[in-house]
């Protein structure tokens, strides 16, 4: 579905992402895992051809064997951004934004279709939501709306950048379940996260990045294999210590 060959990202002469190569198959969920600042989000922006103007990239990115074109956004490629409140124009209602997005991408462009999209991602009172402005909705609701847009547009490759970072634990599980619905549409999914639990819960494969380099690529079931990179092993060990305490209290998932 998507193949990345020797991707590097620069700010001037400073290399921020160093010679990254990987592929994601059709119907597969890959998780790009790493600490904050490891280059995960920059890599995802490069895949969407959305890098800031002060950055440039080298290497090759192929989508089903083809190079990028603007028409791929919203058809082949979709993205669920990290901060949903910043992704919607606050001056327009959700219904107006839907009409504008679907006008050039899909033939269906009516309120009943939009209401179904919102209902499919678990949002109640979809008619009221379509008449609402983004600032009137919670971050979790806007996150669901972005997922609904990708599902409604039937984009083939979806990138979700830290989709559970700004929501509570219950909503996190619901969002991950909704993201998995993309696989039922034979779509490929890449989740960007620093959360090991999210990675192990959602992934078929885990790609581990550290300081701009891809250090490991493996099936999620093999996360605790002795073959894992030493830096990933250290991260797993640190993560296991988070719930340790001096009171002898055991915290469960």
Image (tube, rainbow, N blue to C red):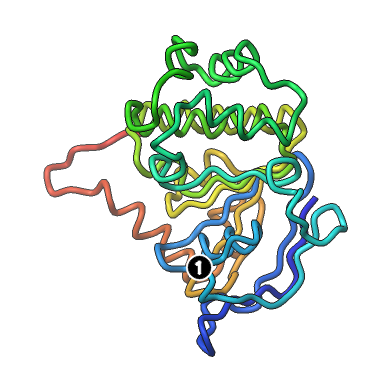
Residue at 80% over, 50% down: 1
Residue at 13% over, 49% down: 246
- Does residue 84 appear to the left or right of 218 in the view shown? left
Judge whether 96 appears above or below 42 on screen: above
Judge whether 168 appears above or below 194 on screen: above
Q: Mark 1 points at which residue?
A: 39
Residue at 64% over, 27% down: 181
Q: Position of residue 108 (x, y in %)?
A: 73, 21
- Does residue 30 appear to the left or right of 125 in the view shown? right
> Can the viewer see residue 52 in this picture?
yes
- Does residue 109 appear to the left or right of 85 in the view shown? right
Q: Position of residue 182 (x, y in %)?
A: 67, 32
Residue at the right extreme, as displayed = 65
Quadrant of res 29: top right
Residue at 48% over, 26% down: 94
Q: Position of residue 49 (x, y in %)?
A: 65, 61
């Amino acid at each position: 579905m998507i193949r990345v060959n020797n991707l590097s990202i620069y700010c001037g002469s400073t290399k921020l992402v160093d010679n990254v190569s990987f592929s994601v198959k059709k119907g597969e969920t890959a998780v790009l895992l790493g600490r904050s600042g490891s280059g995960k989000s920059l890599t995802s922006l490069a895949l969407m051809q959305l890098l800031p103007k002060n950055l440039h990239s080298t290497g090759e990115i192929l989508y089903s064997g083809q190079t990028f074109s603007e028409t791929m956004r919203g058809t082949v490629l979709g993205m669920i951004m990290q901060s949903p409140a910043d992704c919607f124009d606050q001056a327009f209602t959700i219904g107006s934004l839907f009409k504008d997005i679907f006008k050039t991408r899909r033939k269906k462009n009516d309120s009943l279709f939009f209401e179904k999209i919102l209902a499919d991602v678990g949002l109640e009172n979809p008619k009221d939501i379509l008449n609402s402005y983004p600032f009137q909705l919670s971050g979790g609701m806007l996150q669901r709306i972005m997922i609904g847009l990708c599902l409604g547009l039937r984009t083939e490759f979806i990138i979700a950048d830290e989709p559970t970072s700004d929501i509570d634990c219950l909503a996190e599980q619901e969002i991950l379940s909704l993201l998995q619905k993309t696989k039922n549409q034979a779509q490929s999914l890449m989740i960007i996260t620093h959360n090991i639990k999210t990675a192990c819960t959602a992934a078929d494969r885990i790609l581990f990045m550290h300081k701009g380099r891809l250090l490991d690529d493996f099936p999620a079931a093999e996360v605790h294999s002795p073959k894992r990179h030493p830096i990933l092993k250290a991260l797993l060990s640190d993560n296991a210590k988070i719930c340790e305490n001096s009171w002898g209290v055991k915290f469960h998932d």
